[in-house]
Image (cartoon, rainbow, N blue to C red):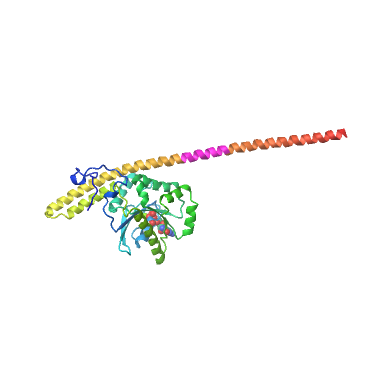
Amino acid sequence: MRVPHGPCPGLPSPDKKYGTIQFAMGGSEYDDDWELPSADITVVLCGKLGCGKSATGNSIVGREAFVSEYSHASVTSTCQLASTALKDGRTLNVIDTPGLFEMTITSEDAGKEIVKCMSMAKDGIHAVLMVFSATSRFTREDSSTIETIKEFFGEKIVDHMILVFTYGDLVGENKLKSMLNNAPEYLQKTVELCKNRVVLFDNMTKDRWLQEKQLENLLDVVDSVNTNNGGKPFSDQMLACIKEAHAREQEVHDAIGYTEEQISELKKEIQRTRDEQLANITNMVEEKLNITVDKLQQQLMEEQNARLEAERLAAEARLRSDEEIRKLKKRLEKAQQENEEFRKMASQHKCSIL
Ligand SMILES: Nc1nc2c(ncn2[C@@H]2O[C@H](COP(=O)(O)OP(=O)(O)O)[C@@H](O)[C@H]2O)c(=O)[nH]1
Ligand SMILES: [Mg+2]
């Protein structure tokens, strides 16, 4: 097994085997260190509360693995994993989340959940399914969730993103297409960013054929994402560290020539180290998330201010042109009046000559 070189936060001291690299999330530099792609696929469901993440997860695994119901509070409070065997023999792992990158979620909760999600996807993430309801307006904040993820994990994460629209029973494929064609600029940019990888899901259907067709459709897009990424899942240093922690557990598991007592001691030590390591990663994730969210909130505020200023200037210009029109009208009325007076005068003058 090839493991990324480099100590992860929380490890008591760097040892020769793991080298020395600082913790930084970014995405790209670890790709070459990743072991050969396994046949299994892991997808993560992201999106805001109530958009249909859990329902989509259930449609994908073909059973009620996740709780999905209408609620004002999140029914999915923590990340959950469910797997299914695909027809071609591969295993598809689906991770349902409570909405990790929403601005409403506190960075402390989000940090823990992100680390939990990454621990579940310790072999990497093949696709990030960005879920949106096709019946709700796609807002500027929705597109900023994608920007947060991009900012947080680095540009490369976008190569793994697929836009999933739910409520396919209420919004058909044609309606979604025309909606996307006439969408506001930020949605069109989001679709462009994801290279038109858009999938529609009807999570309510009981029609077996449709259930299979939409799953096949999604898998085709996941496979094309995979091909475009050379079969490599998304990875970054955070994932590499988590993978390393698990690799060490496995090493103890596979240890030969130790007494049971020694193995139990070793296990305890590894667990302690892993917990410490995960706590450190969580702190860093929270810190990075705070910075990312602050930055994007600032950006949104600036955009909002610029919009308000543009609206104010347009209203001012409108007022000015209203005033101009009023003045012009007045001048015209005056000219018409003078004209009339002149006509009257001219006709009187004509009479007096006669
Ligand atoms: N009609 C319809 N309802 C859906 C669809 N997908 C999800 N829902 C409903 O939307 C609500 C929220 O779904 P849920 O999966 O819990 O959303 P989550 O918070 O993103 O996990 C539930 O009442 C679902 O039944 C869909 O494709 N069609
Ligand atoms: Mg849910």
Relative image position of residue 49 (x, y in whole percent)? 39, 52
Where, quadrant-wise, is the C terminus in this rendering? top right
Nearer-the-camera pick, 7 or 273: 7
- Asked whether residue 173 is drawn in magenta, I would say no
- Determine which quarter of the picture holds residue 215: bottom left
Nearer-the-camera pick, 34 or 261: 34
In the displayed structure image, the side of residue 277 where residue 333 appears, left or right: right
Residue located 25% across and 51% down the image:
243
Residue located 39% across and 42% down the image:
296
Observer able to see residue 260 = yes
Highlighted range, magenta: 304-317
Residue lying at the far bottom of the rendered structure: 208
Nearer-the-camera pick, 202 or 128: 128
- Determine which quarter of the picture holds residue 208: bottom left
Relative image position of residue 159 (x, y in whole percent)? 37, 51
Q: How many marks?
A: 0
Relative image position of residue 334 (x, y in whole percent)? 71, 35
Observer able to see residue 54 = no
Relative image position of residue 182 (x, y in whole percent)? 50, 52
Residue lying at the far right of the rendered structure: 354
Q: Is residue 207 above or below residue 341?
A: below
| Principal secondary structure, stretch drawn in magenta | helix
Q: Is residue 98 above or below residue 302?
A: below
Nearer-the-camera pick, 57 or 36: 36
Q: Is residue 48 above or below residue 212?
A: above
